[in-house]
Amino acid sequence: MSNQNQRELPRDPAIRALILQAQRMQLSRRKLLAGAGGLGLAAFLAACGTGGTGGSAGNSTAAAVADMSESDKNIFWANWTLYLDYDDAAKNYPTLDAFAKRTGIKTHYAEDIDGNDSYYGKVQAQLAAGQDIGQDIVTLTDWMAGRVIRQGFTQELDHANIPNIKNLLPSLQDVDFDPGRKNSLTWQSGYAGIAYNKAKYPKGLRTVSDLWNPDLKGRITVLDEMRDTMGLLMLDNGVEISSGWGDTEFAAATDVLSKQIANGQIRQVKGNSYKEDFISGDAIAGIVWSGDITQMNFENDDQWEFVLPDAGGTLWSDNLMVPVGSPRKTNAEKLMDFYFEPEIAAQVAAYVNFISPVQGAKEAMEKIDPELMENPLIFPSEADLAKAHVFRSLSAEEETNFNSQFQTAIGA
């Protein structure tokens, strides 16, 4: 780092130390990714997966729960794996340590979420009873966040404790599953779109329909996440997925999916493990998640091109929420506020490589890794965001119906 860059670092010694550590972490991570074998890092590159446990369940009910934050300086946070800055050398989470030094609040961080449905299944009964599930923050994807908010399983946030909520990107400030962001805050976002191997398919892709080209037969993967795969198929059919569609539009897209599976065009329908097929070369194109392609390209010499289709891609987010029985809501709100500081958000984005929801994080990234400032999959342009569509919220009946149709189509 040049002397000029040294002078440009913030004066706050805690933030300055974080930036210096983040710079070192970026160098170490790039070396690791450059030197590791492709399939050996498949788990490392996952945006979500299996994790451990954390926290201890209590018996507080929704009516009786009291906020003990003033006397209990702890937070229990459940998140997906590899979804927070981690220093392999120091064996710590730098931003969590910085938060503890600033506030005196210790965070017990658990990579405890391996899937929205599986995690919900573990805690649903306790949430329904208004009990403490042992976590003060949970991190769930839009559609599941909408479900738990609708069911009354979260506590309303006190925005006075989260002044940095002003830094939330305008496009995320008001969502249909949580108007006014009363019960949730975005953690990270990403796209579902299409990607291809640039060397093996140099003519490239622009639309989802391009995946059905005969020369790609048997070399295509699509995601087993219904909202992303079906969202892209419906967009390709000219449907605005954010509103105003129903059984007819969904069935038309399901017909396309069923046909392409039956005729062998689609090789497999997969979750995160689709990356293994890309790395091995068994698949050379497909419907993918943006952050995965960013991370895979770090490891494999920029082999793939991610594309938001001409008709648009899907935009999803994972969200921070306080469960109904948590006795440390104020502590949780202070942690949320901390992560909406641009310098802190930039450090997280430098590690996880998904879209940061924080205004100012891009400018703060200049001190950590200037190259990442220009990565549109982390800091998208307004033009890209205009092509990204949020899959509309579903009623409980629609969710059951459409999931059933999708599972039938993919042979699950």
Image (cartoon, rainbow, N blue to C red):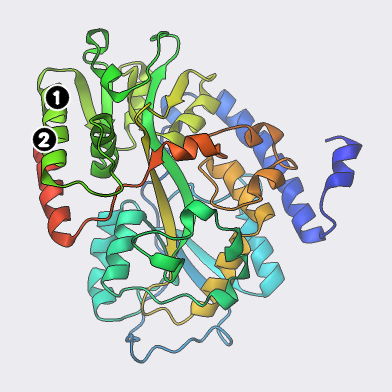
Residue at mark 1: 261
x and y percent of residue 240 in the render? 28, 41
Residue 155 quadrant: bottom left
Asked if residue 162 is positioned above or below residue 116 in the image, the reply reads below
285 over 272 or under it: above or below:
above
Q: Could you tell me which secondary element the residue under label 1 belongs to? A: helix
The quarter of the image holding the N terminus is top right
* Residue 137 visible in the shown view: no
Q: Is residue 106 visible?
A: yes
Circles 2 and 1: CB distance less than 8 Å? yes
Mark 2 Cα within 10 Å, few/some/many (few <14, many 20+)?
some
Q: Amino acid at mark 2?
A: Ala
Residue 158 vs residue 217: left or right? right
Can you tell which mark lies on residue 334?
Answer: none
Q: Residue at x 51, y 86 (%)?
A: 68
Dot 2: what SS?
Answer: helix
Q: Quadrant of the C terminus?
A: top left
CA gap, disc 2 and disc 1: 8 Å
- Please state which amino acid type lies under the numbered disc 1: Ile
Q: Residues within 10 Å of mark 1 (few under 14, many from 20)?
A: many
- Classify residue 236 by image quadrant: top left
Residue that appears at 75% across and 42% down: 367
Identified at 58% across, 24% down, the residue is: 34
In this rendering, position of residue 26 left or right of residue 302: right
- Along the polypeptide, which appears first: circle 2 or circle 1? 1
Point 38% across, 20% down: residue:
206
The residue carrying mark 2 is: 409
Q: Is residue 207 above or below residue 89?
A: above
Task: Give the percent coordinates (x, y) of residue 107.
Answer: 55, 68
